[in-house]
Image (cartoon, rainbow, N blue to C red):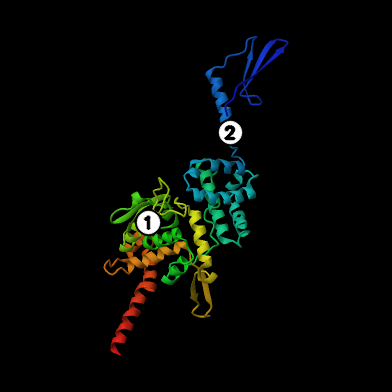
């Protein structure tokens, strides 16, 4: 706000009095007696400036005002755009629940039970419930650091969602053939690059040619881990070399430096790649989609899980595990993938070692016949 001080001249019994306000309708900053319009000293201008700041600053005594201040903080601006979009929806839920109440209620330890009760109202969507509590905890942590609160009763609230490990889920050759039959060339390029690099979606759409080296791809990962972005190094497989050569020849708009481009020769967006991928997956296998099927060893019941773009990382992992000359350890694969050695071991046993053993046994038996 750029304010012009508002002067009010009043004639009283004892003489002329001037009342000066920071702006019309703003707070009074000076009362001066005398017939001449007063000149404002630097101290008065400082008062006006402080009044302007106070006027534009959210009132953090209520939860709603504190949420507004949080959205304007450096903590919020440091988040990735996708994170702000997701968290913003949950901040709206928090404001709908507590926006009109004093922020100080969260300094009452009994609020933990109320937060749990609020979480439980969303139990039909456990991931939504858990993210809402996480965002509330991050907001209250910010309020702690700002000196607005002492406690954070959202910290330590247990989660509802119990995610099953997706480590056993990878894309098989027949899955890749099925989705590529329904995909346009730019999506096929993205799928192929994912299977040969193991990159996450955010990195697939953003990787530039200047990050492609002679022996490896090196880039700072889009995903944060412990509030940091880590530099990843992806070795170039021979198949990747051939793909990159093909991708260099794709038609693209002037100035576009991303490795992948969409149908318009422009960089993919994460949402655009997701939308195209989901559409092709839905049409695959005559509209049946692409699923990972597990049979319960006791009941025999089939459990179906739809395969995701992210699961292509597992396909890349099996490629580098099964490389005939690399002989990578679980730790080396884990370092490339950003996984734990235990996750790598689970995939190796299921898709690499077991298959190799079966093939070896079959060949030996065939030779004995």
Q: Is residue 14 above or below residue 216?
A: above
**Residue receiving disc 2:** 56
Mark 1 and mark 2 lie on one chain; the one further toward the N terminus is 2
In this rendered view, identify the residue nearer to me: 189 or 249: 249
Q: Residue at x 38, y 72 (%)?
A: 351
The Cα–Cα distance between marks 1 and 2, rounded to whole angstroms, is 51 Å
Disc 1: which residue: 247
Q: Quadrant of residue 3?
A: top right
Rendering quarter of residue 36: top right
Q: Secondary structure at mark 2?
A: helix
Q: Position of residue 93 (x, y in %)?
A: 61, 51
- 231 left or right of 157 in image: left
State which quarter of the image contains the N terminus: top right
Q: Left or right: 200 with respect to 61?
A: left
Asked if 35 appears above or below 146 in the picture, the reply is above
Q: Residue furthest bottom?
A: 369
Residue 50 spot, x, y in % from top left:
55, 27
């Amino acid at each position: 706000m750029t304010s012009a001080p508002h002067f009010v001249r009043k004639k009283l019994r004892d003489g002329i009095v001037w009342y000066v306000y920071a702006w019309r309708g703003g707070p009074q900053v000076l009362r001066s007696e005398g017939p001449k319009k007063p000149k404002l000293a630097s101290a008065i201008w400082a008062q006006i400036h402080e009044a302007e700041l106070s006027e534009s600053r959210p009132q953090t005594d209520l939860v709603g005002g504190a949420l507004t201040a949080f959205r304007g903080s450096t903590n919020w601006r440091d988040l990735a755009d996708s994170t702000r979009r997701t968290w913003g929806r949950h901040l709206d839920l928090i404001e709908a629940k507590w926006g009109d109440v004093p922020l100080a209620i969260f300094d009452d330890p009994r609020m933990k039970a109320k937060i749990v009760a609020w979480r439980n109202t969303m139990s039909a969507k456990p991931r939504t419930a858990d993210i809402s509590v996480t965002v509330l905890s991050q907001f209250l942590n910010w309020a702690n650091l700002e000196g607005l609160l002492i406690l954070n009763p959202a910290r330590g609230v247990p989660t509802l969602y119990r995610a099953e490990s997706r480590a056993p889920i990878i894309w098989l050759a027949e899955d890749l053939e099925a989705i590529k039959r329904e995909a346009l060339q730019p999506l096929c390029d993205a799928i192929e690059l994912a299977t040969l690099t193991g990159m996450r979606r955010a990195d697939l759409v953003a990787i530039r040619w200047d990050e492609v080296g002679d022996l490896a791809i090196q880039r700072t990962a889009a995903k944060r881990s412990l509030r940091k972005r880590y530099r990843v190094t992806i070795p170039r497989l021979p198949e990747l070399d051939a793909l990159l050569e093909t991708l260099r020849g794709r038609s693209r708009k002037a100035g576009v430096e991303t490795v992948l481009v969409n149908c318009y020769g422009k960089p993919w967006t994460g949402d655009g790649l997701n939308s195209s991928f989901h559409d092709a997956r839905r049409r695959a296998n005559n509209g049946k989609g692409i699923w990972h099927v597990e049979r319960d060893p006791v009941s025999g019941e089939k459990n179906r899980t739809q395969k995701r773009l992210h699961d292509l990382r597992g396909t890349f992992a099996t490629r580098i595990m099964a490389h005939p000359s690399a002989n990578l350890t679980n730790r080396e694969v884990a370092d490339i993938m950003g996984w734990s050695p235990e996750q790598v071991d689970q995939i190796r046993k299921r898709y690499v070692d077991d298959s190799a053993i079966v093939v070896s046994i079959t060949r030996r038996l065939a030779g004995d016949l």
